[in-house]
Image: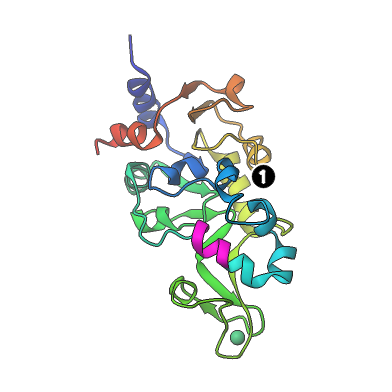
Amino acid sequence: MKTDIEYLKEIIEKSGNIVFFGGAGVSTESGIPDFRSADGLYSEQYKYPPETMLSRSFFNRHTDEFYRFYRNKMLYPDAEPNAAHFALAKLEELGSLKAVITQNVDGLHTRAGSVNVLELHGSAHRNICLTCGIVYPLDKIIQTEGIPLCDCGGIIKPDVVLYEEELNHSILDRAARAIGNADMLIVGGTSLNVYPAAGLISYYRGKNLILINKSETPYDYRADLIIRESIGKTLGKIVGI
Ligand code: ZN
């Protein structure tokens, strides 16, 4: 009898249009905690829950407090890509993987070498002046204190999608199209409960839906294979890293 890994490897080898959809679980293996699963940790240090502090109205009204939380809990400039990031970059290089769709804002897929990365929630590596539109790198946020200001005096905002903000339509369209055209969809490190993950998965018309996640998801019933294992270990084994 084949192991799950052997079976997964076999489907990947037969597929010509693989799309990967990933969530926070992909980055936790790089030491970046999922803020959604750790509310308790913040209650002592902060007066508001993370979802409030990461909302657009909170950014507008309490910009200073937003940045205190954001710098302390959302930015991990020393995090390195893990085996999952490298394996996906390798599969793209080999030609079968066509897109990585991610809910993470840490830029680790790009760092690992992936080219077609669709960042649904934006990127901490782009920071935009709300007055003149100039884009600053992550260093501009890390190397300043308080509210980061542009040379023009404007307030700089991370190009990450905050609660109450809309997702970028063009990226959402490209993600929906990539999923709609795929013949294999690998979903990893997400419980698929967070908008717009569940909606996007419904565009999938292909045969092989693979879920790699430690907990249950609402799509388990549709999956051809469910692996409740570390995503780095699983994908790493596929490409031999
Ligand atoms: Zn400016």
Most extreme residue toward the bottom is 152
Q: Up-down: is 52 above or below 58?
A: above
The image quadrant in which ligand 1 is located: bottom right
Quarter in which the C terminus is drawn: top left
The reply, left or right, for residue 7 in relation to residue 220 is left
What residue did someone put label 1 on? 196
Asked whether 132 or 37 is in front, the reply is 37
Label 1 crowd bin: few (<14), some (14–19), many (20+), radius 10 Å: some
Principal secondary structure, stretch drawn in magenta: helix
- The relative height of residue 154 versus residue 120 in the rendered view (above or below) is below
Callout 1: CB less than 8 Å from ligand 1 = no
Q: Is residue 232 magenta?
A: no
Is residue 9 placed above or below 164 in the rendered structure?
Answer: above
Q: Amino acid at mark 1?
A: Pro
Q: What stretch of residues is rendered in magenta?
A: 68-74
Q: Position of residue 186 (x, y in %)?
A: 48, 34
Task: Name, please, the residue furthest toward the top.
Answer: 1
| Relative to 188, residue 66 above or below | below
